[in-house]
Image (cartoon, rainbow, N blue to C red):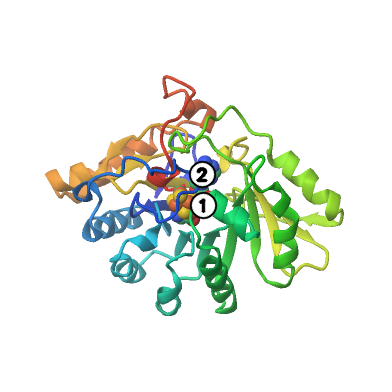
Amino acid sequence: MLIDNHNRKINYLRLAVTDRCNLRCNYCMPSEGIDFVKNNKLLTIDELSKISEVLVGQGIDKIRITGGEPFVRKDLMVLLRKLSALDGLNDISVTTNATLIGPYIDELKALGIKNVNVSLDAINKETFERITRRNQFDTVHNNLIRLITEGFNVRINFIVLEGQNEQDIVPILELMKHYNVSVRFLEEMPFNGGSKSFVGIKWNYKAILEHVSTTYPNFQKLESPPTSTSINYKINGHKGTFGIIPSFSRTFCGSCNRLRITATGDVITCLYGKPKANLRDIIRRKNEVEEVQNAILKAVGNRAKTGFEAQEEHASTIFDNSMTSIGG
Ligand code: SAM
Ligand code: SF4
């Protein structure tokens, strides 16, 4: 079992499988993309699988596949097949922009993958295409509805962006009224690869909640698992729920159960901190399970207590990295 130096149990791994993406969301990276790493710096499927196996042996029971866009990786299903055969791994989930997932939906279902998070920051086509800088709205919308109707447990991630999509907050709730989906509104974080200057946010969780309550005054707060990053609510008469993730305000650090591994093998114990080890280098140098285990134990044993403490690891308050490298 992995317990950090603040007595938090770590059982959830966010595993990035690539830093590449077919969209260019303006809160995530510049229009020209970031300096994507060379192919040989990315973890191979065998390496991703080996690292997962070691971590599951250490008590990780939930793995979320992220990126970049996981489905730009042509061999993704090979990894998912391997993961689904791992004893002790109870939950494999995927975070995706839903542009490329269509052909894989049947196999995902067959593998028992139930939880899919879809990033959708607008319900208006023009707004969506302005934010993502690509014209994929119809594909995303179709795949989203297919995932829902095929019975996946779908959560929509919607980042509230000042001056860009606040007018879509209420319409997305309205659209999802008849679907058993959770729409989660996220605070924007400063990891945009230098695509725009970031001073702070107007749309913090309080502002989002106030905005929702002007249209829907009747909603109830729901009980959420202690490790949940979202505060969840149900609107009277709506089939689904909505939630708010205070990712910039960071009110959830006390119960954080997550570890992140980037597509290049960096171990990240807090989104706001610096990498603590590189597993790719260890594996390629030694290929020894014990070395990987020790690197994880050391990283987990030196975790910052909060995102604000982790942020102090950086010399400046400006983050020049992108979520496509970290994995969200
Ligand atoms: N491409 C996939 C997708 O968009 O769902 C997976 C990777 S993406 C980096 C993972 C999550 O990070 C997405 O839900 C995305 O909305 C979120 N994200 C990216 N940049 C962000 C930012 N600056 N602030 C908050 N969340 C961000
Ligand atoms: Fe790609 Fe996801 Fe970043 Fe959008 S948020 S650019 S879909 S990695």
288 up-or-down from 117: above or below = above
Cα distance in 3D space between marks 2 and 1: 6 Å
The location of residue 299, given as percent across then percent down, is: 35, 37
Q: In this view, does 6 lie to the left or right of 281?
A: right
Q: Earlier in the sequence, mark 2 or mark 1?
A: 2
Q: In this view, does 217 lie to the left or right of 60?
A: right
What residue occupies the far left of the structure in this picture?
A: 285
254 up-or-down from 154: above or below = above
Q: Is residue 42 left or right of residue 11?
A: left
The location of residue 232, given as percent across then percent down, is: 70, 54
Circle 2 residue? 26
Give the residue at x 30% y 66%: 74
From this viewpoint, is residue 307 visible? yes
The reply to whether discs 2 and 1 touch (Cβ–Cβ < 8 Å) is yes
- Amino acid identity at mark 1: Thr
Label 1: which secondary element: helix
Q: Which mark is residue 132?
A: 1
Mark 1 residue CB less than 8 A from any atom of ligand 2: yes
Q: Which mark is residue 269?
A: none
Give the residue at x 75% y 56%: 170
259 up-or-down from 215: above or below = above
**Which quadrant of the view contains residue 162?**
top right
- Amino acid identity at mark 2: Asn
The location of residue 202, given as percent across then percent down, is: 68, 34
Mark 2 residue CB less than 8 A from any atom of ligand 2: no
Give the residue at x 45% y 77%: 109
